[in-house]
Amino acid sequence: MSAGGFRKTTARICALAGVGGVSTTLFLAGCSAESGEAGESVGATSTTTQVSTDSAPTSTITTGPGPASRSTTPTVVYRPPFIDHVEWTETEVGPSLSVFPTTSGRYTQDPAAMAAAWREVVGLDANADTPGMQAQFDCHWRFARIIEPEKPSWNLEPGRPVVPEEDMIGARCNPGFAEEY
């Protein structure tokens, strides 16, 4: 006890957040002048902090009592919208719908997100709703996001043929003729 009758306790809180909320760390540790056990949480209660904005990933961090050496891993949840906007352009191979995914659209692992994202595309432009355009979109969703997640847009052409999935993958999501640039 100190002269005023209170035990002297100090706490250190350090937080680090990465770009886009992808990397987040929270460290809470207490030091008690009496216990002398630096790095031990003293009197901590569980705390959950959730940060979210539209279409940005949501990070949830939970901390609680226990040794400071125990790490917490944030859970990142990518929420809709998955598509920022779509834009028609004229290319050497004809009209092309450029689909611009959001950060959530690029990184979500939710199995239901592909269908939701396609509904967003059709909601933004009903002319996209053709079997060939959806097949190209599905291919980009399944593979282009992994191979090149920062590609600015995924380009879908109504003039491309409808092909079996193996042929679509073999053509790098661009069956019938070369990818336009």
Image (spheres, rainbow, N blue to C red):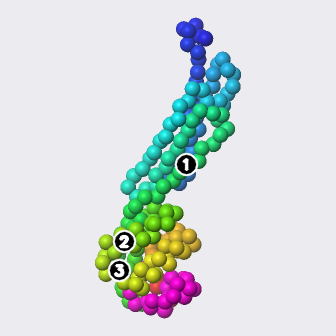
Q: Which amino acid does the dot numbered 2 rest on? A: Arg
Give, as a three-letter code, the residue at label 1: Pro
Task: Say which residue appears at 45% left-offset and 66% top-offset.
Answer: 113
Q: Position of residue 165 (x, y in %)?
A: 52, 84
Q: Nearer the viewer, residue 164 or 6?
A: 164
Q: Return the disc, 3 or 1, that comes first in the chain's sequence.
A: 1
Q: Position of residue 4 (x, y in %)?
A: 54, 8
Residue 147, image x and y in percent?
57, 72
> Which mark, residue 128?
3
Residue 171 seen in render? no
Q: Is residue 137 visible?
A: yes
Q: Earlier in the sequence, mark 3 or mark 2?
A: 2
| Residue sitting at the far front | 112
Q: Which element type, helix, strand or loop, lies under badge 3?
A: helix
How many marks can you see?
3
In the drawing, what numbered circle is on residue 150? none
At which x and y percent is residue 106? 48, 66
Q: Residue furthest right?
A: 36
Measure the alpha-carbon separation of dots 3 and 1.
37 Å
For marks 1 and 2 on the same chain, the one whose residue lies earlier in the sequence? 1
Q: Distance between the Cα atoms at labels 1 and 2?
A: 29 Å
Q: Is most of the magenta stretch helix, strand or loop? A: loop
How many residues crowd mark 3 within 10 Å: few (<14), some (14–19), many (20+)? many
- The kind of residue tagged 3 is Ala
Write the start and end of the magenta stretch as one range: 155-177
Instruction: Say which element carries label 2.
Output: helix
* Residue occupying image coordinates x 49% and y 85%: 174
Q: Report the side of 39 relative to 150 (left or right).
A: right
Q: Give the residue at mark 1.
A: 74
Residue 114 highlighted magenta (yes or no): no
Q: Closest to the observer: 37 or 48?
A: 48
Give the label on residue 119, or none: 2
